[in-house]
Image: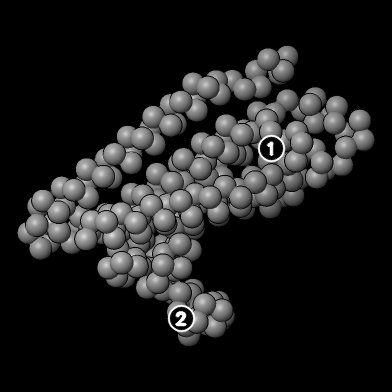
């Protein structure tokens, strides 16, 4: 049913975008502010899914989280069932696949913060965590919001990864994109049309949100850069 696929898609996208928004803060901070020589390699790993074919990523996730391997067996023990072919597995796969879409806008916002703002906070005696909480995050809210919207939109449109890792189980891992695919294969054009129209609606709303954020944010730190 379309309502079941819609519920799975919305729940998956909301959870993925929200969890990634939280994870993007320390990851982006490490990429931008760390002086480690490993940051370039780390950023390359975080953005690997931008160029990695979804089917390849799905295969790697199945291999890593197989119940026969340590990460997979530990997760199976914790969850009470294997990670692949479950909603939890779908969530993990979606987070890995959409990670760069959430991290990159936040990292870009961090890079646009005027250095003198951070220096003034240090002079006033603020520690690193206080600076991050009271200066960096408030000045990067537009990047955080952009990352959330991108993570949500990217998850809504997933196909290859969710097909391989989720297994297309009705009511648990079947998303709108998988339902559209199934309806086309079973010669049910009306069902496929409903799913496609909903996906178009999500995409359109996401684009409106992104354009709003872009127009509202503009150059958020431009007046302070001089």
Q: How is the image coloured?
A: one colour
Name the secondary structure under disc 2: loop
Sequence-first disc among 2 and 1: 2
Query: At 33% across and 39% down in the image, what residue appears?
Result: 203
Query: SS for tag 1?
Result: loop
Task: Indicate the position of residue 107 as horizontal and vertical percent values.
Answer: 61, 39
Question: Label 2 to label 1, Cα distance in Å?
Answer: 37 Å
Q: In this rendering, is residue 28 above or below 74?
A: above
What is the number of the mark on residue 80? Answer: none
Q: Residues within 10 Å of mark 1 (few under 14, many from 20)?
A: some
Residue at left offset 26%, top offset 45% = 198
Q: Which mark is residue 137?
A: 1
Q: What is the number of callouts on the image?
A: 2
Query: Where is residue 100 drawn, in percent x and y?
Result: 51, 47
Viewer can see residue 56 = no
Q: Position of residue 121 (x, y in %)?
A: 85, 31
Instruction: Judge left or right: residue 61 versus residue 110.
Output: left
According to the picture, the residue beneath numbered tag 2 turns out to be 81
Q: Quadrant of residue 177?
A: bottom left
Residue nearer the viewer, 159 or 9: 9
- The image quadrant where one finds the C terminus is top right
Residue 76 is left or right of residue 189, and the answer is right
The one nearer the camera, 8 or 183, is 8
Image point 46% across, 46% down: which residue?
Answer: 151
Please provide percent x and percent y for residue 8: 35, 59
The residue located at (20%, 55%) in the rendering is 180
């Amino acid at each position: 049913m379309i309502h079941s696929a819609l519920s799975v898609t919305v729940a998956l996208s909301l959870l993925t975008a929200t969890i990634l928004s939280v994870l993007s803060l320390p990851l982006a901070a490490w990429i931008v502010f760390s002086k480690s020589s490993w940051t370039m390699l780390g950023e390359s790993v975080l953005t690997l899914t931008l160029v990695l074919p979804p089917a390849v990523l799905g295969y790697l996730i199945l291999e890593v989280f197989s119940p026969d391997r340590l990460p997979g067996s530990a997760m199976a023990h914790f969850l009470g069932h294997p990670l692949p072919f479950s909603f939890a597995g779908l969530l993990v796969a979606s987070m890995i696949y959409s990670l760069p879409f959430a991290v990159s806008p936040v990292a870009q916002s961090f890079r646009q913060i005027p250095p003198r703002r951070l220096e003034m906070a240090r002079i006033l005696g603020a520690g690193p965590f206080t600076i991050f909480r009271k200066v960096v995050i408030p000045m990067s809210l537009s990047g955080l919001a952009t990352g959330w919207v991108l993570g949500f939109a990217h998850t809504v449109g997933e196909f290859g990864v969710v097909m391989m890792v989720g297994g297309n189980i009705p009511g648990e891992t079947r998303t709108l994109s998988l339902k559209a695919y199934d309806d086309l294969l079973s010669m049910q054009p009306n069902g496929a049309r409903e799913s496609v129209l909903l996906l178009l609606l999500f995409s359109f709303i996401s684009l409106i949100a992104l354009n709003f954020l872009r127009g509202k944010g503009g150059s958020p730190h431009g007046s302070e850069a001089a």
